[in-house]
Image (cartoon, rainbow, N blue to C red):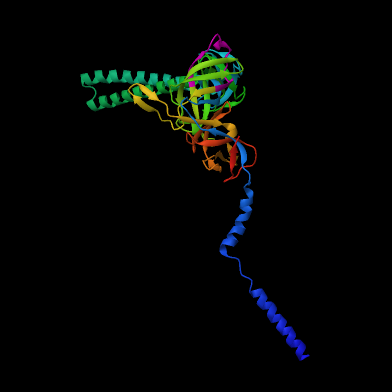
Amino acid sequence: MKLTSAIVLASAALFVAACGSEPAPSGDAALRGTSAGAARQISQEAVPVSVLTVRPSTSSAPLAFPAQVEGNRRVAISTRLMARIDHIRAREGDPVTEGDTLVELDRSALDAEKARAEAARQQAEAALSAAANQLRRFIALEERGSATERELEEVRTMHESAQAGLAAAEGALAAAREQLTHAVITSPVTGHVVARYAEAGATAAPGRPILEVETTSDLRVVALVPEGQVSRLREGDPVTVEIDAARMRLEGRLATINRGASAPARQFRVEVDRLRAAGDASMETLRPGMYARLLVTAAPADGARQVTSPGQVATPEQITIPVQAVVRRGQLTGVWIVPESRRVRLRWVRLGAARDGEVEVLSGLQSGERIVLEADGRLVDGQEVREQ
């Protein structure tokens, strides 16, 4: 038994010694093991790609914005009174001329107020007439010595009070007549009724619109421009407007650019006026509310204009690339850069307006750099590529 136990203990000691003699992996070997998975993501074979060399373009980039035709003036018709609406003389789409009666309000309360004001004025006139007679009488008495100077002064004060009373009564009557003029609402412009917000029998309130009238003789085009592109527009620049419904093309001028953006879309309202039809088209077919497309030949993205000599302005270079070269990762946009090593790198870029299959690159790309246009395989950072 003792011999057997000794043999077992000796065998166990030899086994432990053998296991402890195996060397541990070095730090470099461990690092290579952790990066092996990433290395396997890059193909050992070069991926065939089509390469495009970025070239500058000095032509202005055309921008397109959805727009709408509007009348030059759009007026909300309301009243200063709180009264019941008796009649509304126009409906949506009706043509109106400046001065036409649009709304009639209940005037019974106003007529009563006017009658009270007229009666008060008559009383004030009678009081003034009596005070004037009294003043004349006391002047004569004072001259004969039958009235004292103090008595005459009191009569003069009564006369002046009667005069003030008449002035107040006439003012109240004028106010009542003025209120009556607001009971009949006329059109301030010539155009068409574009909206109706109330019906007869409803109560009109000050500042609450009843109708909206829009001019049709002088039209404009209105568009909303995103904040990333509004800095490229200039007031006074010529623009083009396309109206698909009327099958016409207009020329105009960028009249105004709103200095404040509308939240939350962060868009700026721009207006185009001085519209004229191109070719043989007639402006008679143009109607407020029509969909339009605003085309602007804009300044460069940074808005800079370089003066080369007095009277001359040079437009800085712009870079546009095909839309198919853009790589999208969620909200980010980038391109595959092909360096001399032919191992591509993904670079994030900021894009501008897109039109006709081309998109402008605002930042992140320079002229002369080479980018991947199309790839016949999957690309990752560091992937070797082969031009085809």
Residue at 60 percent across and 62 percent down: it is 30
Q: Quadrant of residue 171?
A: top left
Give the residue furthest to the bottom: 2
- Could one spot residue 263 in this view of the protein? no
- Picture coordinates of residue 370, whole percent (x, y): 52, 36
- Foreground: 299 or 118? 299
> Which span is picked out in magenta?
272-293
Residue at image point 62% right, 40% down: 47
Check the picture and name the quadrant holding the N terminus: bottom right
Pick the residue in front: 144 or 101. 101
The answer to whether residue 75 is magenta is no
Q: Is residue 280 magenta?
A: yes
From the viewer's perspective, tell me whether residue 163 is left or right of residue 360: left
Q: Is 320 situated above or below 277? A: below
Q: Position of residue 72 (x, y in %)?
A: 50, 19
- Check the picture and name the quadrant holding the C terminus: top right
Residue situated in front as seen by the camera: 137 or 163: 163
